[in-house]
Image: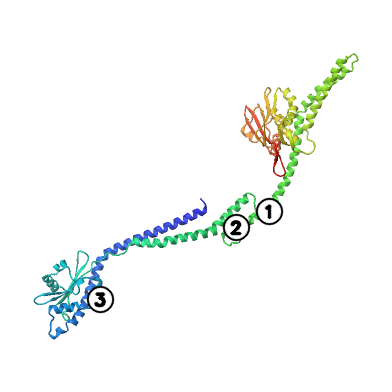
Amino acid sequence: MSLRRKITLLFVLVNAITLALIVASVWFEGRRIKTRLDSDRGLIAARSADVLGLTFKFDMERELAKLLESESAGRRFDEFEAALAVSELSYWDEDPMAREMLDRAVLVRLAPLDVNRFNPRRRLIFERGDRDQLDKADLRDRLENAAGIVREPLADGSVLVYGMMDPEIARDWGFVFKTRRPEPFGFQSAGMVRTLLSIMVPGTLVLILIFYFYFSSAVLRPLAAAESAAFRISAGDYSGPLEDGDREDEIGRVAAAMNQMMAELEKYRDHMLGLVSEATERFREAEQGLVVAERLAAMGRIAAGIAHEINNPLGGILNAINRLGQADLSEERRHKYHELAEEAVRRIQATVQRVLEATPRGESRVEDVLLGRIVDQAAGLLAHRARSEGKELEVDVPGDLLVVGDAHELSQVFLNLLINALDASESGSRVTVRARQTTEEGILIEVIDQGAGMAPEQRERIFDLFYTTKPGNKGTGLGLGIVHNIVTGHGGRITVESEVGVGTRFEIVLPRRRPQPGGDEARD
């Protein structure tokens, strides 16, 4: 997962967890407040009833005082006049507390002979069930025994409040009212949560977008540029400095350091390329000298076989010359010895030609080379040795296979491989060289012996210069290293498979096309 996704996911998770904690806190706090309000609702209703009772008593005393002024002159209201006067009081419509909290209300006048009830408004008339609870005897008993204002909670949550007026203001007048049943509080924690979510979720999304775009432009984009620059540096491309090098924060300092590093690496690379080029040229010169030295060493090892190849025909030539000097030699015998001498000279000429072709002369030259001819030359130089040691040398290379390379260097490859194969083989064993075309681009050559084979640790070092598995002073350790360099220098590859007690197989793949200046390749 990319850093961009990780940081965005982390930011979203942190905000989601924070939002969830806030919502849970609001929810539980709302539930706690609602529970507390519900538990305090009865107490609030009772206290409100007390306040309303006092206020109601005070206001009604004031209003009744106005109506009863005439009574102080000796005149009393009859029941009709009293009811009419009570109904005309503006208190019932103008007092906000009375309109809000009164559910039922009645004014009572305790006459000596009767109890008179006066309902102020139709909406405040006690219903039948309420009226049954307010019979005259019960009202008289309640009001006469009331000490101040009495409050009685009812089963439905409402409160019944009653009491007598101040006798100095409104003698024999009392009141009874019932408050409205308190409604459950409209406080809902779910509503608070919805409101909170409707505000915080869009705000969080906006905050995430702002953070994402800012972080992307301020951090992630420079990091991506630094990553791209690091890959370019690993590929050897030191061009294109980072654009954030002029920033003054940590990102800018990193970019400036990378720009400076790229500049220093480019200078160091150019310097090292010059040194490597010079060292490569020296190595090539030394390697060419090693190739020549190894070729001469190989020629020295097969010199005895070459001398024997020349010595036998020379003996035949001397014998033929001696016989040709005899006077009594017949013409037929003379002609026969002449042919034998000529054949011996041609054999010597062929042997010398093989030596000359295997010997470097002048600079190397890359050209189309017949693979079979090179292998035959190498095998011909070693044929006498193979026969003398009782070993079989088998060559299976088609004569029309063409490879691209230097004939003398390729001759050195097969000469070294065959010498090593013969050195590793016992009398009666076989050394095989075979080749075939594997693809349009390559020729596969195999050199196989039935010798002692090599252990894995020997096989891993077989192409190292100056490493040899031959006992004593028989090997220089240069042959296979030079073979490897020649093959790879020709654009080919060489591998080895070997098993102790079974033998060794060298596999060489050489190109069969010559590269052209335009990049195309010439086909055979």
- What residue did someone put label 3 on? 95
Residue 349: quadrant of the picture:
top right
**Residue drawn 59% across the image and 57% down it:** 254
Image location of residue 346, percent across then percent down: 82, 25
Disc on the earlier residue, 3 or 2: 3
Picture layout, residue 138 above or below residue 198: below
Q: Which mark is residue 391?
A: none
Disc on the earlier residue, 1 or 2: 2
Q: Dot 1, how many residues are within 10 Å of its Cα: few (below 14), some (14-19), or many (20+)? A: few
Asked whether the beta carbons under mark 1 and mark 2 sit within 8 Å of each other, the answer is no
Q: Dot 2, how many residues are within 10 Å of its Cα: few (below 14), some (14-19), or many (20+)? A: many
- What residue did someone put label 2 on? 255
**Amino acid type of disc 1?**
Lys
Image location of residue 335, percent across then percent down: 86, 18
Point out the frontmost of discs 3 and 1.
3
Picture layout, residue 39 above or below residue 379: below
Q: Which sits in the foreground, 473 or 356?
A: 356
**Residue drawn 17% across the image and 68% down it:** 127
- Left or right: 479, with 235 as reference point: right
**3D distance between C-alphas at marks 3 and 2:** 79 Å
**Amino acid type of disc 3?**
Asp
**Residue drawn 46% across the image and 61% down it:** 206
**Local secondary structure at mark 3:** loop
**3D distance between C-alphas at marks 1 and 2:** 19 Å
- Left or right: 359, with 423 as reference point: right
**Amino acid type of disc 2?**
Ala
Q: Dot 3, how many residues are within 10 Å of its Cα: few (below 14), some (14-19), or many (20+)? A: few
- What residue did someone put label 1 on? 267
Q: Can the viewer see residue 473 in this picture? A: no
Image location of residue 134, percent across then percent down: 14, 69
Q: Can the viewer see residue 291 in this picture? A: yes
